[in-house]
Amino acid sequence: MAREITWSDAEEIGIQLQEKFPELNPLTVRFTDLHRYVTDLEGFSDDPAKSTEGKLEAIQMAWHEEYEDAK
């Protein structure tokens, strides 16, 4: 079973999103889609309504870092 993750786990979420969507440039993803991608991750256990623009930005930047490292 996957470890439970929350909105605060930006680095872990970034890693998981990179593994799930390796060809997708995170900087092209709208926040509405990013929100859905995060809440659909296995192990995500936080309240979907508790996301904020700041948390989504942190997740997007963590994912972008993983995306750049994978190039």
Image (spheres, helix red, strand yellow):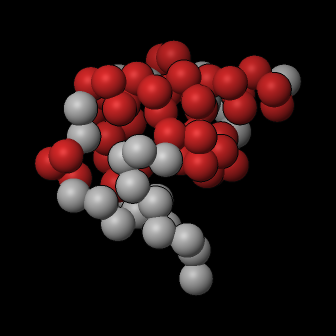
Write the residue at 65% across / 45% down. Answer: 15
- Give the farthest residue toward the left: 49
- Give the farthest residue toward the top: 27
**In x, y percent, where is residue 47?**
21, 58
What number of labels is visible? 0
- Give the farthest residue toward the front: 8
Q: Is residue 8 above or below residue 67?
A: below
Q: Nearer the viewer, residue 58 or 33?
A: 58
Write the residue at 47% across / 33% down. Answer: 59
**In x, y percent, where is residue 66?**
71, 32
Write the residue at 59% across / 30% down. Answer: 62
Side of 14 relative to 71 (left or right): left
Write the residue at 35% across / 66% down. Answer: 45
Whether residue 37 is visible here, answered yes or no, is: no
| Quadrant housing residue 8 | top left
Q: Which of 46 and 21 is in front in this view?
A: 46
Whether residue 52 is visible here, answered yes or no, is: yes
**In x, y percent, where is residue 71?**
84, 24
| Quadrant housing residue 1 | bottom right
Side of 28 relative to 19 (left or right): left
**In x, y percent, where is residue 63?**
59, 32
Q: Which of 3 and 18 is in front in this view?
A: 3
Q: Nearer the viewer, residue 15 or 54?
A: 54
Q: Is residue 1 above or below residue 41?
A: below
Q: Is residue 55 above or below residue 4?
A: above
